Amino acid sequence: MFTLQVGYPVRDYAAWKQAFDKDPAGRAASGARSIRVLRDTDDENNVDVHLDFDTKDAAAAFLERLRAQVWNNPEIMEPLMAAPPTARLLEQVASENPG
């Protein structure tokens, strides 16, 4: 499994979440198997999104779609973002359930 980890330093979490829920880049249609939204416990406007994909190519293609369709769109980004988003592509190499 491959996880696209995206960091969003947002101006207002509620406004960002409303835009995120509209899914402008088509997460499901891009093959995202699961999506997790996490917030920093000390700063609710520091948001991470983890999107899981079956293949590295699918995750990379979705990242390119994000960059082209969302991150390069000032009408979407300027009102919502305090700074540019960051992204990393991670490969799961181990998993365990403690206990």
Image (cartoon, grey):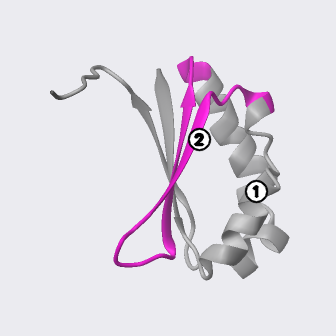
Residue 81 visible (yes or no): no
Query: Which residue is nearer to you in this view: 31 or 74?
Result: 31
Task: Identify residue type, mark 1.
Answer: Asp
Judged from this view, the residue extending furthest toward the left is: 99
Q: Which residue corresponds to the image point at 81% horizontal and 63% vertical from the top-left?
A: 73
Q: Position of residue 95 (x, y in %)?
A: 29, 22
Under mark 2, the amino acid is Ile
Please state, as top left, top right, bottom left or bottom right, where the C terminus lies in the image. top left
SS for dot 1? helix
Q: Is residue 92 above or below residue 37?
A: above
Report x, y in % for residue 91.
Answer: 39, 26
Q: Residue at x 36, y 24 (%)?
A: 92
- Total labels: the figure holds 2
Which residue is outermost to the front?
99
Residue 33 located within the stretch drawn in magenta: yes
**Numbered badge on residue 80:** none
Q: Identify which residue, 11 or 14, lies in the foreground.
A: 14
Q: Are marks 1 and 2 in contact (CB under 8 Å)?
A: no
Residue 24: horizontal and vertical position, in percent? 82, 51
Mark 2 burial class by Cα count in 10 Å: few <14, some 14-19, many 20+? some
Instruction: Give the residue drawn at x 47%, y 20%.
Output: 1
Residue 28, quarter of picture: top right
Q: Classify residue 9 as left or right of residue 43.
A: right
Above-or-below relation of 92 to 22: above
Q: Which one is in front, 75 or 29?
A: 29
Tell me, yes or no, if residue 40 can be seen here.
yes
Is 92 in the magenta? no
Residue wearing tag 2 = 35
